[in-house]
Amino acid sequence: MTLTIVAEPTPLSTSKDGVILVGNTRVTLDTVVAVFKQGTTAEEIVCRYPSLKLADVYATIAFYLNHQLEVEAYLQQRQQQSTEIRAMNQARFDPQGLRDRLLARKTQQEIC
């Protein structure tokens, strides 16, 4: 029996929104890299996110380790987008105004 060595494709895909997903799941590259950087093992990652396959997690970690600069640039871009979206949402939907309206409504219901 001869062992055939085959290059496996990276289990990463890009969603229509430009988010990189791991395997055939909705778990993002951001998530896997973040918990890996916290010291979580591949096995623990699969326990936390059971939709992931262990081989896909190892392949994702290997991809990250082999392409750290590119992945870190992608993660920084995603963080910047997140900050911008959060600021736009807070400008459109003032959280303090919402809280005040909800408290006023609760007070009004208690009176009735």
Image (tube, grey):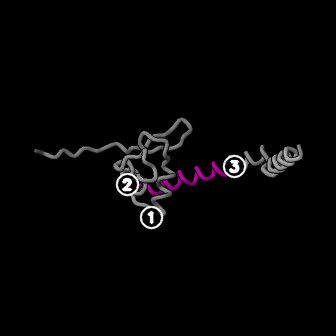
Residue 87: which numbered mark, if any? Answer: none
Query: Mark 1 packing: few (<14 Cα in 10 Å), some, or many (20+)?
Result: few
Q: Residue furthest front?
A: 112
Depth check, mark 1 against mark 2: the one in front is 1
Which numbered disc, 1 or 3, marks the residue that appears first in the sequence?
1
Determine the CA span between mark 1 and mark 3. Answer: 28 Å
Query: Mark 3 packing: few (<14 Cα in 10 Å), some, or many (20+)?
Result: few
Residue at 80% across, 50% down: 99
x, y percentage for residue 2?
12, 45
Residue at 45% across, 64% down: 39
Determine the CA span between mark 1 and mark 2. Answer: 15 Å
**Residue named by callout 1:** 39
Which numbered disc, 1 or 2, marks the residue that appears first in the sequence?
1
Query: Given the image, on which type of amino acid does mark 2 rest?
Result: Ala
Residue 86: which numbered mark, if any? Answer: 3
Q: Residue furthest top?
A: 16
Depth check, mark 2 against mark 3: the one in front is 3
Query: Given the image, on which type of amino acid does mark 3 rest?
Result: Arg
**Residue named by callout 2:** 62
x, y percentage for residue 50?
42, 47
- Does the magenta run of residues contain 79? yes
Query: Given the image, on which type of amino acid does mark 1 rest?
Result: Gly
Q: Read off the magenta span.
A: 66-83
x, y percentage for residue 5?
22, 46
Label 3 SS: helix
